[in-house]
Image (cartoon, grey):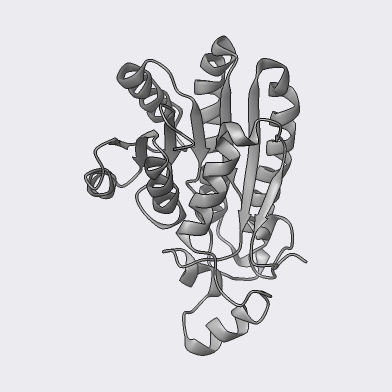
C-alpha cells in the first residue's frame, strides 16, 4: 500500500497504459480520478473500483483542464499526484506528408496538455510544498524511428520538459519524472506500426532485447514506484521501461 491515502489524477486513464496505471495505483491504496476524453470509457473503468472517480476532460483545452482540477480539489481537498498519460500519434508517414491538423493534434495532446495541467495544478502543489508529477513519454523521444518524426519530436519535448520541471520545482518539494515505454499492447499499437500483422509484429519485437511489448502492468509498476515516497530522492529521471529497446 505504498500510495495509501494519496490522491492522483491520471489522464488518459480509461484504456491502455493509463488503465494499467489506474489499476496499480488503486491496488496500492490511492484515490484516483480516471480522466479521459471518452466519458463513457472513464465511467466504465472507474466502475471497476470503489476508490476511482470518472471525469471527462480534453487535456488540450485549458478550460476543460481547469474544470477537472477544480473537480478533483472539490472531491478531495488536495491532489498529491498527477500522471500526464494522455497521448496520441500520427500514422507512420514521411514527415513532409503529415497534415497540419495531425501535427497540431499531436503537439496539443502530447505537449500542450502538460503545460495546461501544470498551470492548473502546480500552484496548489507549491502551496502544499508537496507533489509528484509523472509524464508518460516514449522511447521515440530517446531513439527516434523513421516516419514518426513529429511524434518523436513531441516525446523529445516531454523528456526535456520533465527535466526542466524537475529542476524548477524541486525547491518547492515537487518531484517530476517520466517513464519511456516502448510500444505496447494498447489501442495505439497499430498506429505506431502502420499495420498490425504477424510479420510486422515480429520485425518490431526483434528490436526489443527482452522480446516483448510493454504491457499496461509494466507502466503501472514503474509509475507507482516513481510517485511513491520510496522514490523521494528521485526527480528528473527518464526511466526506460522498454525491455532494452534503447540500449
Residue 207, x across and y down, in percent: 68, 77
**In terms of depth relative to the viewer, which is nearer, 1 or 13?**
1
What's the residue at 56%, 21% (across, down)?
A: 122
Count of numbered badges drawn on the protein? 0
Spot the residue most to the front.
Answer: 1
What's the residue at 73%, 23% (across, down)?
A: 168
Position of residue 102 relative to residue 165, above or below, is below
Dividing the picture into quadrants, the one containing residue 175 is top right
Dividing the picture into quadrants, the one containing residue 132 is top right
Dividing the picture into quadrants, the one containing residue 57 is top left
Residue 216, x across and y down, in percent: 46, 58
Position of residue 150 relative to residue 145, above or below, is above
**On-image quarter of the N terminus:** top left
Q: Is residue 99 left or right of residue 208?
A: left
Quick check: can you spot residue 111?
Answer: no
Spot the residue most to the top.
Answer: 127
Residue 225, x across and y down, in percent: 57, 43
Position of residue 75 relative to residue 192, above or below, is above
**On-image quarter of the C terminus:** bottom right
Residue 95, x across and y down, in percent: 67, 65
What's the residue at 54%, 12% (across, down)?
A: 128
What's the residue at 46%, 34% (across, down)?
A: 3
Quick check: can you spot residue 48?
Answer: yes
Q: Is residue 58 left or right of residue 178?
A: left
**In terms of depth relative to the viewer, which is nearer, 51 or 99?**
51
Q: Is residue 116 left or right of residue 12?
A: right
Spot the residue most to the bottom.
Answer: 199
Amino acid at each position: 500500500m505504498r500510495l495509501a491515502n494519496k490522491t492522483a489524477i491520471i489522464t488518459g486513464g480509461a484504456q491502455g497504459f493509463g488503465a494499467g496505471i489506474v489499476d496499480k495505483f488503486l491496488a496500492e491504496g490511492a484515490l484516483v480520478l480516471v480522466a479521459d476524453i471518452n466519458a463513457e470509457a472513464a465511467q466504465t473503468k472507474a466502475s471497476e473500483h470503489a476508490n476511482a472517480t470518472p471525469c471527462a476532460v480534453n487535456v488540450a483545452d485549458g478550460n476543460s483542464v481547469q474544470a477537472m482540477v477544480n473537480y478533483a480539489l472539490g472531491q478531495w481537498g488536495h491532489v498529491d499526484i498527477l500522471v500526464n498519460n494522455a497521448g496520441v500519434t500520427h500514422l507512420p508517414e514521411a514527415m513532409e506528408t503529415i497534415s497540419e491538423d495531425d501535427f497540431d493534434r499531436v503537439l496539443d495532446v502530447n505537449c500542450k496538455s502538460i503545460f495546461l495541467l501544470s498551470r492548473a495544478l502546480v500552484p496548489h502543489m507549491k502551496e502544499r510544498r508537496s507533489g509528484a508529477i509523472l509524464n508518460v513519454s516514449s522511447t521515440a523521444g530517446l531513439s527516434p524511428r523513421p516516419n514518426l518524426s513529429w511524434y518523436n519530436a513531441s516525446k523529445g519535448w516531454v523528456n526535456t520538459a520533465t527535466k526542466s520541471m524537475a529542476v524548477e520545482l524541486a525547491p518547492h518539494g515537487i518531484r517530476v519524472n517520466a517513464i519511456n515505454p516502448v510500444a505496447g499492447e494498447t489501442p495505439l499499437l497499430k498506429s505506431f506500426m502502420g499495420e498490425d500483422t504477424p510479420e510486422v509484429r515480429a520485425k518490431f519485437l526483434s528490436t526489443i532485447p527482452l522480446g516483448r511489448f510493454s504491457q499496461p502492468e509494466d507502466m503501472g509498476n514503474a509509475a507507482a514506484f516513481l510517485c511513491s515516497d520510496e522514490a523521494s530522492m528521485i526527480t528528473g529521471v527518464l526511466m526506460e521501461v522498454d525491455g532494452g529497446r534503447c540500449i
